[in-house]
Every structure is written in structure tokens, then in C-alpha cells.
Image (tube, rainbow, N blue to C red):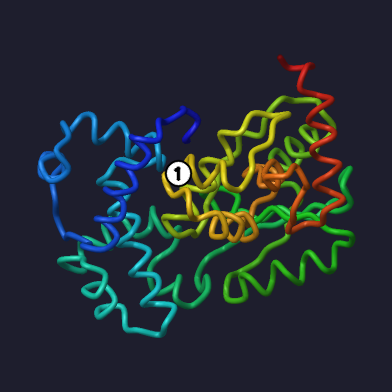
Amino acid sequence: MTGEAISKHDSHLAAQVCDYLRSAQPESISLAQLGERFHLSPGHLQRIVKRATGFTPREYAAKLRLEAFKTELRGGGRITEAIYAAGYGSTSRLYEHSDQQLGMTPTAYRQRGAGLTIFYSVLPCPLGWLLVGATDRGICKLSLGDASPALIADFEKEFANAERLRDDEVLGGWTSQVIAWLKGWQPALDLPLDLRATAFQHRVWAALQAIPVGETRSYSDIAAAIGQPKATRAVAQACARNPVALVIPCHRVVRKDGELGGYRWGIERKRRLLEAEARHKTDFS
């Protein structure tokens, strides 16, 4: 997570490194080579990139490569062609880590979850209705709404080709934690996640998770925190595409003037969440 403050100078340097990795897409580059290129010691370069993005330079480059690979697949490209187009030197290099990074095999990802089993549960909560969907790795969907049929329909559309099994008992431990958190009975939600996201979205969501309970940040604050101060609009889009309400607290991001801004699950829910967190902040301090 990106909770530490970072100076404007270091933020600018981190942005330069990230821009280079995005534009050059080097197949292989060492930390020492990066440090020499940007006239920084390898240790210092790694620290500022990690603080700005939540990833080491190697991890960030790997995320970019995976993002390019997924883009090729979504465009209908063949897996073999997508592997080389994304800069992987061989099929084995992708498949060594694809199951961990994608949460499913490349073929299943392209086919919108085909072959994947997702358990889900729907239940009433203090904010209306709650749907939690999860693979064996963690939660992949957590949404809020006014009625269970609409939540289920949205879930089924997003994971159209996965095997979807409703099981309130299997997910009972996680759903009970969410309910307890909504009622102010526990200070934080620490639940495993299994998400598909771009490198940029991962960075934004990590920055959101670093916002303390009872506090807010502006979209421009988050853009600055991840080393891309001009990406305010892209940050807002990443917040809007957050698939797991509450665990990734996009409700804690507001406009620069203090207005609430948008919220995927309804502006009134955002207002109630922030008011509740402000009340409960002192309970756990």
C-alpha cells in the first residue's frame, strides 16, 4: 500500500521511471541498469517507486506486461500471439505466473471466467442488500444495492461463463465480517481478494486501502500519491470500476471542494458510510 508521504521531487522521479517502463517496455532490465539510466542508486530508485506505486520496478514492469497481454486477449487475439506481443519471451514464462496473477488460466480469462467456480451469497445489510462472490483465492465481487435480484443479475453478467454457486454457509465467515464492520463492531476489513485489474487500477486501489478510517482524500490526492498528479480523471474511473465495495474503500475519495462526487453503489450509501466511519473513528483509536 502507498501510505507513506512522498516528496514532489521523488514523485517526479518515480513518474519518470514508470513512464520509461510504460513506453520502452523493456523485456528485461535490472535495477542497477535502471538506476544508472536515471542517475540514482538502485536502492533509492526502488524505494521511491515502491512508495509511489505500491510496486517495485520489477513488479510494476510485470504488471504492465500482464496488462498488455490481457488487452490482446480481450481484443480477440490468439494466446500465442498475445504472449509475444506483450513481451513474454516464451509461453512458459507467462504460464509460470498466470494462474496467480490472473486468478485463472489465460484461456479462461479470455472466455470471461469459463472453467472458474465462484461461490456467492446475497443477504440484507445496514445499507440495503449485499452480494459477496468469491473464488477459492478470495473475494472477486462485493456489491451493494436495493434488491437482491438486481445484484444477482449484475453478478451473473460480469461472470457470465463461470460456474456460479450460491452458498451462504461457505461464505458465512466473510459476510459476517462485512456485516460486523458495517455495524461498527470491528475497525477494519481484512479479507483476501482475487481481482482482475490493470497495473494502474492496482496502484489506485492500493492507495485507497491506505486511507485511514474516518478520513477522506480527493481524487487529485490519490493521483499525486501514485506519482501521476495529472491522472485525476483516470483515478476517478478506477474508483468507479472498483468491483469490491468497502474492502477497497472508494467511498473515502471525494472531490477537491469537499463534495462527495460519485459512487458506484449510490451517493446516499457513500454519505452514510462516511458519516458512520466518522462516528466510529474514535471507538477504535
135 versus 215 height, above or below: below
Position of residue 130 in the picture relative to residue 49 (left or right): right
Which residue occupies the foreground of this view, 25 or 103?
A: 25
The residue where tag 1 is placed is: 226
At horizontal 68% and vertical 63% (from top left) the residue drawn is 165
Task: Give the amino acid type for the residue marked by disc 1 in the picture.
Answer: Ile
Where residue 161 appears, as percent x and y from the top left, is 58, 76
- Quarter location, residue 85: bottom left
The answer to whether residue 72 is above or below residue 204 is below
**Image point (40%, 35%), residue name:** 8
**Residue 173 quadrant:** top right
Judge left or right: residue 256 versus residue 224. right
Percent from the top left, x then y, of residue 116? 52, 66
How many numbered tags mark residues here? Answer: 1
Q: Residue at x 87, y 51 (%)?
A: 268
Place of residue 259 in the rendered image (x, y in percent of width and height, measured from the top left): 78, 47
